[in-house]
Each structure stands twice: as C-alpha cells, then as structure tokens.
Amino acid sequence: MEEPAPEPPKPFASRIVPVIVAGAFFMDGLDSSIISTSLPQMAESFAVSPPQMSAAITSYLVSLAIFIPISGWIADRFGARQVFCSAIAFFTLGSVLCGLSETLTELVLSRIVQGFGGAMMTPVGRLILTRTFPKDQLMKAMGYYMLPGMIGPTMGPLVGGFITTNFSWHWNFYINVPIGIIGIAVALRYIPEIRLKQHYAFDVWGFVLIACGMGTAQLAIENLGRNTLDIGAELALIFLAAIILAAYWFYARSRTNPVLDLKMFRGRTFSIAVIAGSVIRAGIATVPFLLPLLLQVGFGLDPFQSGLLTFLNTAGAMSMRAWVRHLVRRFGFRAVFLSGVFVLSAFMAGFALFEPTTPHVGIAAYLFIFGVLRSAQMIGMSALAYSDLSDEDMSKATSIFALAQRLSQSIGVGISATLLTVLAGNGAVSLADFKIVFLAIAFLMASSALGFRRLKPEDGWQVSGYRGGAG
C-alpha cells in the first residue's frame, strides 16, 4: 500500500483537530452513562419493568462491539474525515430517534443506530490524530483526546439525573443534536482528508465471524452479575462466543487482510499496550461502578453527593494531562508504567479502608490523587500503542485498540458486579463485600506488571523522546 498523502492542514488545525475529536469522544462517553439514572422514568413511559430497560444499554454496547472491527477498513476506503463526519451524523440521528421512541423496541433499534455511529467516531477520531500529528506530538494530542472520554461517563449520571428531574428523559438524547451539528461543521472545515490511495477488499466472512463473536461476548459480559440469565444460559453464551472467536482466529491466520488483523499483535509494544493495558483498564473501569454503590449503599450518601465525589477522580485526571508527556520524556514508558501500576494498585486496595466515618474531604483528596495516577497510565498507553506502527497499519491498530478498550471496561465492571453478587448471596451487599472486591481488583491491576516489565527502557522513544536506555 502507498503511504497516505495528507492535505496541507488548514490554519490552526494543529490545535483545533484534537479538540474536535475530543468533542466526539465526550459525546460518546456521556451517552454511555447518561440514561443510567433515567431508567425508572423511561420504564414508566414505555410501560415496562425497570430491569427490562437494561436492553437500552446492552443494545448500544453490543452494537459497538459488532461495528468497531470494521471502522479502520471503512476509514481507509472512504477517507477518515468523511467517515468521521458520517459517524457523527449517524450518532446524532440515532439520538433523535431515541428521543422520539414510543416503545422499548423502537428505543433498542435507535440505540443500535447510535452504536454504529459511536463505533466509527472514537476509533476513526483516534486514527485522524495518529495520521495528522507526528509521533513526537502524539502524546499531547492524545491528552486532549482522552480527557473528554474520562469526563463523559462520570458526568453522565449527574447530567441525566438533572435533565430527567427538571425536563424529561427525552432530552438526554436531544442534547446531542447541537453538539453533533457543530461537530460536523468544524470537522469539515478543519480536519484534513487522509486516506490510503490503495485499499484491500472487504473481508465479508471475517466480519460475520467477528461480529457474531464479539456481539455474543459483549452480551455475555453485560449479563455478568445482573442475574438476568440463569447460570446455564450465561455459560452457554460464553462458550458460544469462545467457539466463534476461535473460529475467527483460525480463519484470520489464512487471510492476507482480515477485517481484524491479529498479526498486529506481533508488534511487541503494541501487544503490551493492548493486553497489559486492557488488564489495568479493566480495573480502573470498576471505580465509576463500585464507588457510587459504596458511597450510597454503604455510607448512606445521596446520588448527587456520591456523584460529586466521584467526579473528583476525573478532575485529578484533568490536572495531570499536561504533565504526562514530560513525565514520560524524563523517565520513559517502562519506568512510568511499572511504578504507576503498583502505586495505582495500592490506591485501589486503599478504597477498602474507607469507612462511613471517613471524612468526605479525605475521600475527595484520595479520589483526586487516584485520578492523577490513572491519567498517566491511560494517556501513556494510548500513545505507546502507535509508537512503532507505520501509517498504513494505523487503521488496523485503531480498530483493535478501540475494541480492546471497550471490552476491557465491560469485563472489569462485569467481574466486580459478579463478585459483589456472589459475596452478597441472597442478602444485601455489605461493606465487607465491597472491601473484598476492591482488594481483588487491586490484585488484578497489579498483575498487568507482568506485561509492562517486557518493555525495554527505550521503547516508544519516537513518542516519548526518551533515549536513556538506548545503546
């Protein structure tokens, strides 16, 4: 394949492009959690039980799992800017359809449309950054890109609760319309069109296999800890997903350009960033799930109070964004990741020390510091994944990285929910149950060090600028 020939960037594009991509990432992140506090009102509107409303969340996540694998191919075929703008349009259209839905079935179908847009937006947005910025500027761009994705899911329950209380649940979806319109307009104005001049044929059978496998896997993960399926059905879903994904693995080995190219894992830095990164990301993803439950069920705080405290985790991440690249340039990825893993795991275990009598100021400070620590890991991993890749491999890498990111987050929440359910048995969840789960998740996060220790001191120097371990 030939290298992409980017158009000359428009004025100020180097500063505006990350902000545009970040806006789409924020919209996707916000939408992933905004309806969580509105489900009872939506259930009443649709005349269904609240547990049935989980289909509105599951359908969106399954749609993401199905369509993310083809995002890279579509961007190469039709151009990243065109696909990015179309993705925002699909997401916005899906939002309008969700707000207009009069039945749960209509809402689920609309969420699938939204999911298709979201499946293109975030990986293609990341692809735009990797092909627009030289590698020595990638960490700075990634810092702008990732923060809104951290803020969105945290703000979602607060914003959704406020909108539902003061207006109606429909506006949880309609607020995406002006954001989407503005996003399309500025993207067309400032994002350069970058595409490969040659592209390979679409892998139809590979897509069928990976879509069925990932969709089934996501469905199984979403049911972990919810007791919506009996244990036999849950195990059957997991087994079916494993069989289909194994079939795809054998199929992809014989293809030159499969829809999801697993040969990318032959790259050492990429495989470490994805696999070890997924382990620690799964642990980090449990905090927005476990902490509000602990604060409300264990400590008796109301949803608004717990939401404000939880948001300080994101505030800490925001404060660290500008410093991550300086930290990595000074010490290198290996040192930052290895030290960060153990400190972050220790902080995760520290949540088990929280008591109802713990001062709220102390909890707030602790969460802020935790946010600082996780920001260094998350931004660094996103940049390291692309450090050794050629331009023509970027689209393949973004599809894999985005899929791993989504699945690891779902798996983390699923594991923690299952542990809480098992520990509680037939009774209510106790404070002791939360403590055990936090300790278990801390151990899981610490295990990612086994992957990060395979890094060499100079790995990722193209991105970090650190050459202390070379030669």
Image: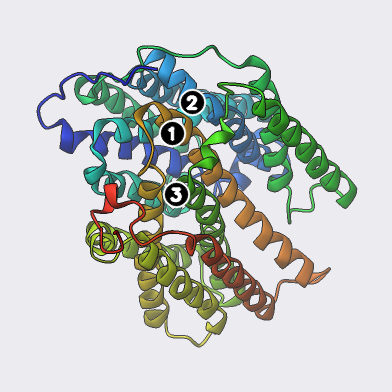
Q: Which residue is mark 2?
A: 71
Residue 346: x and y in percent read 49, 77
Amino acid type at circle 1 is Pro
| Label 2 – label 1 distance at C-alpha | 7 Å
Instruction: Name which of mark 2 and mark 1 comes first in the sequence.
Output: 2
Q: Nearer the viewer, residue 229 or 218?
A: 218
- Closer to the chain start, of discs 3 and 2, is 2
Asked which secondary structure carries label 2, the reply is helix
Horizontal placement of 391 versus 163: left or right? left
Mark 2 Cα shell of 10 Å, populated few (<14), some (14-19), many (≥20):
many
* Apparent side of residue 182 relative to residue 160 in the rendered image (left or right): left
Separation of marks 3 and 2 at Cα, in angstroms: 22 Å
Residue furthest toward the front? 471
Disc 3/disc 1 C-alpha distance (Å): 19 Å
Q: Is residue 249 above or below residue 434?
A: above
Spot occupied by residue 18 in the image (x, y as percentages of width and height): 25, 38
Where 79 falls versus 435 (above or below)? above
How many residues crowd mark 1 within 10 Å: few (<14), some (14–19), many (20+)?
A: many
Quarter of the figure with residue 256: top right
Q: Which residue is mark 1?
A: 123
Residue 269, numbered circle: 3
Q: How is the image coloured?
A: rainbow
* Three-letter amino acid code of the residue under disc 2: Ser
Quadrant occupied by the N terminus: top left
**x%, y% of residue 10?**
13, 24
The earlier-in-sequence mark between 3 and 1 is 1
Mark 3 residue type: Thr
In the figure, is residue 433 to the left or right of 371? right
Q: Residue at x 68, y 21 (%)?
A: 208
In the image, what residue occupies the spot 80% across and 72% down? 427
For the residue labelled by badge 3, is the local secondary structure a helix, a strand or a loop? helix
Within 10 Å of disc 3 (Cα), the crowding (few <14, some 14-19, many 20+) is many
